[in-house]
Image (tube, helix red, strand yellow):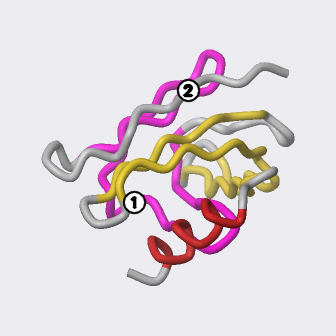
Amino acid sequence: MSARKLQAIDSGSQNVTVEARQIRLTLSPEAVVVNKSGIEFRSAKPFSLWTEMTVSLDHPQEGKLDCNGVVVACTGNRHRGYRVVMVFTGMSKQSESRLNALAYS
């Protein structure tokens, strides 16, 4: 497995780019759900379970937050799309606190 850096959420561009190996997605911020332990998003292409990724979130109030994680769920089909769930791993207490602020904002 290899980790790839994801593009930051840019409050001005209204896009989120998710990239892992051969897959690259551009999503609106409304399509990404941030929770206290990771993110969830819809994709037209599937992600393999346990794919390692690095996500860089950029929020106007919380600033930039880099998180490492793995894909723990990818359900759906090619006709309706896939729901991808990624859980962040190895986060510091400070990063966890900032992620919680993002999740509940």
For the residue labelled by badge 2, is the local secondary structure a helix, a strand or a loop? loop
| Residue 21 horizontal/vertical position (percent) | 65, 18
Frontmost residue, 13 versus 60: 60
| Residue 40 horizontal/vertical position (percent) | 58, 61
Q: Residue at x 61, y 16 (%)?
A: 22
Q: Residue at x 45, y 71 (%)?
A: 102
Q: Residue at x 56, y 41 (%)?
A: 55
Type of amino acid at the residue the image marks with label 2: Lys
Quick check: marks 1 and 2 in contact, CB under 8 Å? no
Instruction: From the image, tell me which residue sits under label 2.
Output: 5
Frontmost residue, 23 versus 55: 55
Q: Earlier in the sequence, mark 1 or mark 2?
A: 2
Q: In the displayed image of the protein, which residue is found farthest to the top?
A: 22
Type of amino acid at the residue the image marks with label 1: Ala
Give the magenta-colored segment's residue range: 15-44
Residue 10's image quarter? top left
Give the vertical position of 78 relative to 102 (above or below).
Answer: above
Q: CA distance from mark 1 to mark 2?
A: 19 Å
Residue 67 inside the magenta-drawn segment: no
